[in-house]
Image (cartoon, rainbow, N blue to C red):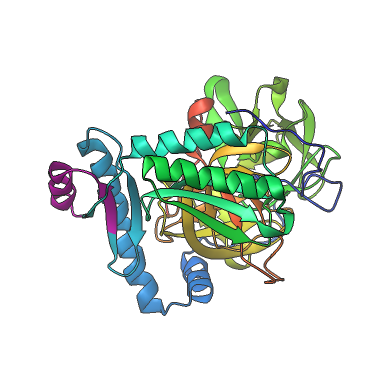
């Protein structure tokens, strides 16, 4: 799959107004004025009630169900010989649903406490069709903003911005549907009026940092690594220029962004970058800015499954919650194509790039860093809410990093 480059500017890396996204990271300036607020899950619960329309009792029930579904997902991946055709959390039943193609796998899934759904196509078949679409799309098709496996439909999903549609778009759609018919795989087209765009103190997840003079981004998660490395994850499109001075939310230097030019990924492999924190007045912390800025302590990492609730912290939009609507999708931002991203319906805004995505308020887990979103921001619901994050595990593995964690 080829990286697609165009001349369109990123939404979020323009000076002082737009910003890029980045993974969670937390650090605290020393000395810190005033008392430090105590971490509490209360703000996360309140945000879930507000954004998901749930009562307090419903939030607690759902979180317990999601925790059990996460445990089942880990067990399922270990038990099955091949990856399942799909996995998602079903909020109606409160169970993990696993798409399988055989009776034996269905029994294994049932034994592990999940609900099997027998489907026609394996994950290998679905992935093969996605690869064929990649070859058809090449360096891009006008109006086609994303594509990937549709786990719930056991098919493939294509996203099209109808406002950018041309004859080439129509021809591609016909070709995609023809490929689906030949493979007997359903191809669904999801139409919208928006195209996703990459959005772009103390070191605290969701708070502001500035890459040189290029713009404003958000901190993801604090990390440590080999050779006594200390720093934080953020979005790759925030860290494209090597060896820039990184400034904290108070304007003072905290370290170096993309040190040596080897700490930034912004292409088919993902959207994540690394900032080294080497100034003595900046310390790493395991917290993310929650409701009203109250810190939420990160306790580990977790896979973001479709259907699960998630909360997002960014320097522009603040703290908002929603659900993961799609996982492992390809996104065409217009200036770059990126694989392996996840969609949510939690609102976001320019400047949130690199911000933190966490789940489970009683023991918050790092899930991803903010990559991009649509035009409908938290203060303007003029269309579908499109918010996209990069799963955090890829960055941790690439650079052999350890997430900074604490006790909830």
Residue 24 screen position, x and y as percent: 58, 46
- Image: magenta residue range: 96-113
Residue 203, quarter of picture = top right
Vertical arrangement, residue 263 with respect to residue 384, above or below: above
Residue in the foreground of this view, choosing between 45 and 184: 184
Q: Is residue 241 left or right of residue 109?
A: right
Measuring 67% from the left and 52% from the top, which residue is drawn there?
196
Measuring 65% from the left and 62% from the top, which residue is drawn there?
318
Q: Is residue 105 magenta?
A: yes
Residue 132 screen position, x and y as percent: 50, 33
Q: How many marks?
A: 0
Residue 124 visible in the snapshot: yes
Residue 29 visible in the snapshot: no
Measuring 57% from the left and 40% from the top, which residue is drawn there?
222
Residue 150 screen position, x and y as percent: 43, 50
Q: Is residue 3 magenta?
A: no
Vertical arrangement, residue 57 with respect to residue 75, above or below: below
Residue in the foreground of this view, choosing between 157 and 393: 157
Measuring 69% from the left and 45% from the top, which residue is drawn there?
168
Residue 68, quarter of picture = bottom left
Vertical arrangement, residue 169 with respect to residue 64, above or below: above
Residue 303 screen position, x and y as percent: 41, 46
Q: Is residue 115 left or right of residue 327?
A: left
From the image, which quarter does the N terminus lie in? top right
Vertical arrangement, residue 82 with respect to residue 407, above or below: above
Residue in the foreground of this view, choosing between 242 and 254: 242
From the image, which quarter does the C terminus lie in? bottom left
């Amino acid at each position: 799959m080829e990286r697609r480059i165009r001349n369109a500017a990123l939404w979020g890396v323009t000076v002082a107004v737009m910003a890029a996204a980045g993974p969670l990271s937390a650090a605290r300036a020393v000395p810190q004025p005033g008392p430090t607020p105590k971490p509490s899950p209360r703000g996360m619960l309140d945000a879930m009630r507000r954004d998901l329309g749930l009562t307090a009792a419903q939030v607690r029930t759902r979180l317990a169900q999601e925790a059990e579904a996460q445990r089942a997902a880990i067990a399922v991946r270990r038990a099955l010989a091949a990856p399942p055709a799909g996995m998602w959390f079903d909020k109606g039943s409160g169970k993990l649903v696993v798409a399988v193609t055989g009776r034996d796998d269905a029994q294994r899934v049932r034994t592990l406490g999940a609900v099997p759904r027998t489907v026609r196509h394996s994950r290998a078949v679905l992935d093969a069709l996605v690869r064929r679409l990649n070859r058809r799309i090449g360096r891009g098709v006008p109006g086609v903003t994303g594509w990937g496996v549709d786990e719930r439909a056991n098919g493939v999903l294509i996203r099209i911005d109808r406002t950018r549609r041309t004859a080439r778009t129509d021809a591609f759609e016909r070709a995609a549907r023809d490929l689906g018919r030949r493979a007997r795989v359903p191809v669904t087209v999801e139409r919208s009026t928006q195209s996703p765009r990459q959005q772009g103190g103390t070191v605290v997840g969701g708070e502001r940092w500035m890459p040189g003079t290029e713009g404003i981004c958000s901190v993801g998660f604090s990390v440590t690594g080999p050779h006594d490395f200390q720093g934080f994850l953020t979005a790759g499109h925030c860290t494209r220029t090597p060896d820039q001075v990184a400034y904290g939310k108070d304007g003072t230097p905290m370290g170096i962004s993309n040190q040596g030019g080897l700490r930034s990924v912004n292409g088919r492999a993902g959207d994540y970058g690394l900032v080294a924190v080497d100034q003595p007045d900046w310390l790493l912390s395991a917290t993310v800015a929650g409701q009203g800025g109250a810190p939420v302590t990160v306790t580990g990492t977790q896979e973001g499954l479709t259907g699960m609730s998630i909360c997002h912290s960014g320097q522009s939009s603040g703290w908002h919650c929603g659900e993961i609507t799609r996982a492992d999708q390809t996104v065409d931002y217009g200036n770059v194509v990126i694989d392996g991203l996840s969609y949510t319906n939690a609102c976001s805004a320019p400047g949130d790039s690199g911000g933190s995505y966490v789940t489970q308020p009683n023991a918050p887990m790092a899930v991803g860093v903010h990559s991009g979103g649509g035009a409908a921001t938290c203060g303007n619901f003029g269309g579908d809410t499109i918010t996209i994050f990069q799963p955090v595990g890829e960055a941790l593995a690439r650079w052999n990093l350890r997430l900074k964690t604490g006790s909830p």
